[in-house]
Amino acid sequence: MLKRGEAVEGLTQADFVVLDEGKPVPIEAFGREIEPLQVALLFDVSGSMTKVLVVMSEVAGRAMAALKPEDQVGVVVFGRNIVPLLEFTSGLHAAARMVQEAPLEREVGAGTNLNGCVLETLQWMAAQKEFPGRRVLVVLTDNRGFHYQTPDDKVLRALAGMDVTLNAIVSPGAKPPKAELLDPGANPEFTPPNVFKLAEETGGEVFTADKAGERFVEMMERVRLRYNLAIRPQTGVEGSFRHLEVRLSEAARERLGKVEINARTGYYTMAPAQ
């Protein structure tokens, strides 16, 4: 939650209201800094990102300092495919060193496949030891390229299924794709990347890397300071989407005024237990 671009601190469960399909539902659990955090750093190492990566590597130590000893960081680079560089570790100095090495050339394949590589990263995360806290994916990308048979909805379902929030740092000039980007008659299985949509619908943020080093530090501070609200999901037709909205309570609105809330836009239902 932001007010004039700054994180709002000191809020309690009573300051929030969660709506499921427009109806208020109880908040079953509330947390913030008490929860350990697992952060997967996914870095686009295509040629256009080299300068941004170099700048971010120079402040890796400061960025890791925003985390706590019980937090974990993993590092993955991608192009057409992913290459994991560091499995999740609480050794934040080791994570900083690996980020500093990330700009080096890696065998990631020609081209950029953002959606496919996000899915690969989620599979990589799932294969590692279960983590008892929040999980966050931070993607650095120029938001260029095309995907084959990996539409945004497929990626969003996978992110929701693992309860992972996606945040992004994008190169200057990166923008969401236009709806009319594909020519008439183009193969609909090829789709343009849209990291902006992935972040928005999972409750994450997108920063522009106009000051790449400072943005990296700020992003790591933000992921640590987020509030965590849990509700009891509704059951129904498996795979149907239910819309969520997070608001301030009336008392909190009067106290704080206008704020920006980044929250997951919904979830997919499970069938009732037999």
Image: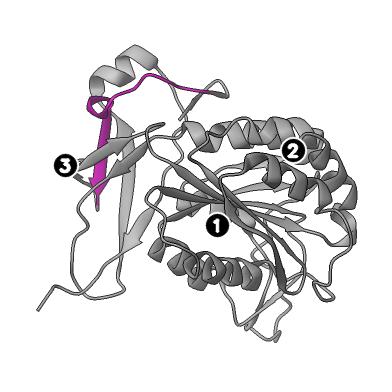
Q: CA distance from mark 3 to mark 1?
A: 26 Å
Residue 45: percent from the left, percent from the top?
Answer: 82, 60
* Residue 233 on the magenta span: no
> Toward which corner of the image does residue 181 lie, by quadrant?
bottom right
The scheme the figure's colours follow is one colour
**Earlier along the polypeptide chain: callout 2 or callout 3?**
3
- Crowding at mark 2 (Cα within 10 Å: few <14, some 14-19, many 20+): many
Residue 41: percent from the left, percent from the top?
Answer: 65, 52
Q: Amino acid at mark 2?
A: Ala
- Crowding at mark 1 (Cα within 10 Å: few <14, some 14-19, many 20+): many
Q: Which residue is mark 2?
A: 60
Which residue is found at the position 23% from the left and 48% from the top? Answer: 231
- Crowding at mark 3 (Cα within 10 Å: few <14, some 14-19, many 20+): few
Q: Which residue is mark 1?
A: 198
In the foreground, 132 or 94? 94
Which residue is found at the position 33% from the left and 12% from the top? Answer: 255
Residue 211: percent from the left, percent from the top?
Answer: 80, 33
Marks 1 and 2: in contact by CB < 8 Å? no
**Earlier along the polypeptide chain: callout 3 or callout 1?**
3
Which residue is found at the position 30% from the left and 19% from the top? Answer: 252
Q: Quadrant of the C terminus?
A: bottom left
**Earlier along the polypeptide chain: callout 2 or callout 1?**
2
Marks 3 and 2: in contact by CB < 8 Å? no
Q: Amino acid at mark 1?
A: Leu
* Residue 9 on the magenta span: yes
Q: Amino acid at mark 3?
A: Pro
Residue 26 got which mark? 3
As drawn, 191 above or below 204: below
Q: Secondary structure at mark 2?
A: helix
Q: Which residues are magenta?
A: 7-20
Q: Residue furthest top?
A: 255
